[in-house]
Amino acid sequence: MDVIDRPTNVRQGEELDLKGVEVFLKDTIPGLSGDLVVEQFPSGFSNLTYLIRVGDTELVLRRPPFGRKAKSAHDMGREYRVMSAVNPVFHYCPKPLAYTEDESIMGCPFYVMERIKGIIPRKRFPKGMELGPDEMRKLCENLLDVHYELHSVDYRKIGLEGLGKPEGYVKRQVEGWSDRYRAARTPDAPELENIMAWLRDKMPPDHPRPALIHNDYKFDNVVLDPDNPLKIIGVLDWEMATIGDPLMDLGSSLGYWMQADDPQEAQMMGMLPTNLPGALTRVEMVQRYAEKSGVTIDNFDFYLCFGIFRIGVIIQQIYYRYYHGQTKDERFSAIIFGVHIAGQIAQGIIRESSL
């Protein structure tokens, strides 16, 4: 059974100038020959990802979305530089191969990287991949362990100390994501001011050991070995990586972690296979991280609430583009419901929190 992640036809309105791409690639990457074929990976709600075949060689091209973009997001050059620094010391990061700011090719900067061929877990595992409870538990442990391994990278040794400012990181994140929500709010979006106020009031001090953080680490951004699906062989989507509080990174990841005993509205939010028998709970994931890091984590309500709120903002930013006709991707037509659900879940965390 074929379980490898596969591309599909390019979506209408997101086509590339094939001739321009072909000339750039063959001039930049040695050894390419043959006709160029382009397909598109259907997942992902931010940067667009294409599979480029040139003869027998498979590459992945990443470019910003069409339409309005968040002001500080979609910096392709930054993403390329981060991956170039990280790949030699964190082998899960794909190797970047070429980058250009020549907008005559497709109207924007873009980069090309190696393809890591494997399984990408989405809402459900692909047909033919079934994990028992013990295997599911092990996969969750491996996911957490790779996340901690990333946080253990010495970012100074690879020249990324200037990637972000760890001082005041939490405050900037809370204020920044609050401002982004207000800027992207549409008339059908919920009022979330009380959540923003709670996050401002409960902010922890700066983490004593800032780390290289991914900022979008979750099941559908990792690649599993098709011959051993418990083994992680790739970590994708580095566009939001920075230097900051590793617990904010963990909270952002676990914001997506819906579990079997969550209420119905949370289950509706589930986008990943984290509620299967054997999967670790959020508490167990936090406990494992605390054991590995040696850090006491007694205020995770804040980090989880922030993670849920942040997901709501990301969904709202995507919906804003659809609402204003800047993308025709029909996947986005009803995602406003996700913003409402994120707000409800965050409100529930606040009601039950002892902070």
Image (cartoon, helix red, strand yellow):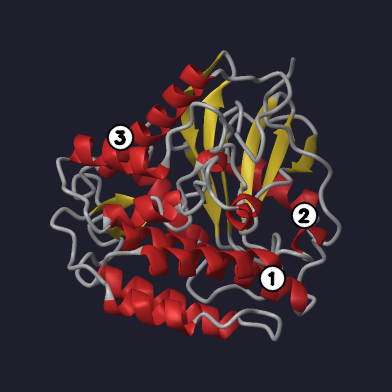
Q: Quadrant of the C terminus?
A: bottom left
The residue depicted at 19 percent of the width and 40 percent of the height is 293
Residue with the mark numbered 1 = 319
Q: Quadrant of the N terminus?
A: top right
Q: Is residue 100 left or right of residue 206?
A: right
Residue with the mark numbered 2 = 16
Quadrant position of residue 33:
top right
Identity, as a three-letter code, of the amino acid under mark 2: Leu
Mark in the foreground, 2 or 3? 3
Q: Is residue 16 left or right of residue 63?
A: right
Return the x and y of residue 282 as percentages of the image width and height.
40, 44
Mark 3 secondary-structure assignment: loop
Q: How many marks?
A: 3
- Above or below for 106 versus 147: below
Identity, as a three-letter code, of the amino acid under mark 3: Val
Image marks 2 and 1: residues in contact by CB distance under 8 Å:
no
- Point out which mark residue 89 bears: 3
